[in-house]
Image (cartoon, rainbow, N blue to C red):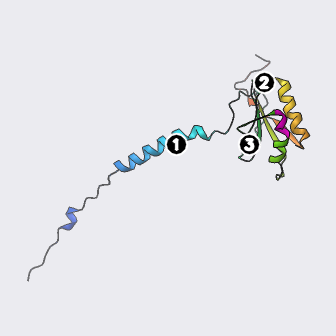
Amino acid sequence: MGVAVRDEGRKVNSNINVTPMVDVMLVLLIIFMVITPMLQNKVAIDLAKADNATAMPDADKEDAVVIAVTRDGAIYLGQNRVDPSQLGSQVRDKLEDKTDKTVYFRADARAQFKVVEDAIDDVRTAGVEDAVLLTQRREGNQIGGE
């Protein structure tokens, strides 16, 4: 009687073909590169620079009420442009069910102060407890206004 020897183990290919995985990763990389700029939910503003700027991590939260004032006097609530006469009522509606009644202002460094002041007044009359002006920390060690 003879014993049958099986050679099937030599036919198995144990190499992993990574080409499809690389293709999928490149497609994902391209998708993320295209979508990332769209995720920015802020109006482009050049904030005023200050030496003693305080970090405000709550302003970056998704549910934070942020008002932006551009250098040409346009007012935005989040990403939506708002008529200045409607600002108070729209902010009141947004803060209706919140316990924290803080509104963050992002004013352009070259915006007219009168427009920023009027926006703050409208928001304060709408019942906002805290109005915070956001600034950017000045880079470098500048002493004495140099």
Task: Inspect this view and state whether residue 33 appears.
Answer: yes
Residue 22 position, x and y percent, is 39, 46
Q: As rendered, which of 144 and 50 lies closer to the eye?
A: 50
- Quick one: quadrant of the N terminus? bottom left
- Looking at marks 1 and 2 on the same chain, the residue that comes earlier in the sequence is marked by 1
Please, what secondary structure does the residue beneath circle 1 have?
helix
Q: Which residues are magenta?
A: 84-88
Prevailing SS of the magenta stretch: helix
Residue 32 is tagged as 1
Q: How far, Cα to Cα, is label 1 from label 2? A: 34 Å
**Label 2 amino acid?**
Ala
Residue 128 position, x and y percent, is 88, 43
Task: Inspect this view and state whether residue 134 appears.
Answer: no
Q: Is residue 17 left or right of residue 8?
A: right
Q: As rendered, which of 114 and 25 lies closer to the eye?
A: 114
Residue 102 position, x and y percent, is 83, 43
Q: Is residue 96 left or right of residue 138?
A: right
Check disc 3 and report the residue beneath it. Answer: 57
Mark 2 Cα within 10 Å, few/some/many (few <14, many 20+)? some
Residue 87 among those drawn in magenta: yes
Which image quadrant is residue 74 in?
top right
Please, what secondary structure does the residue beneath circle 2 have?
loop
- Looking at marks 3 and 1 on the same chain, the residue that comes earlier in the sequence is marked by 1
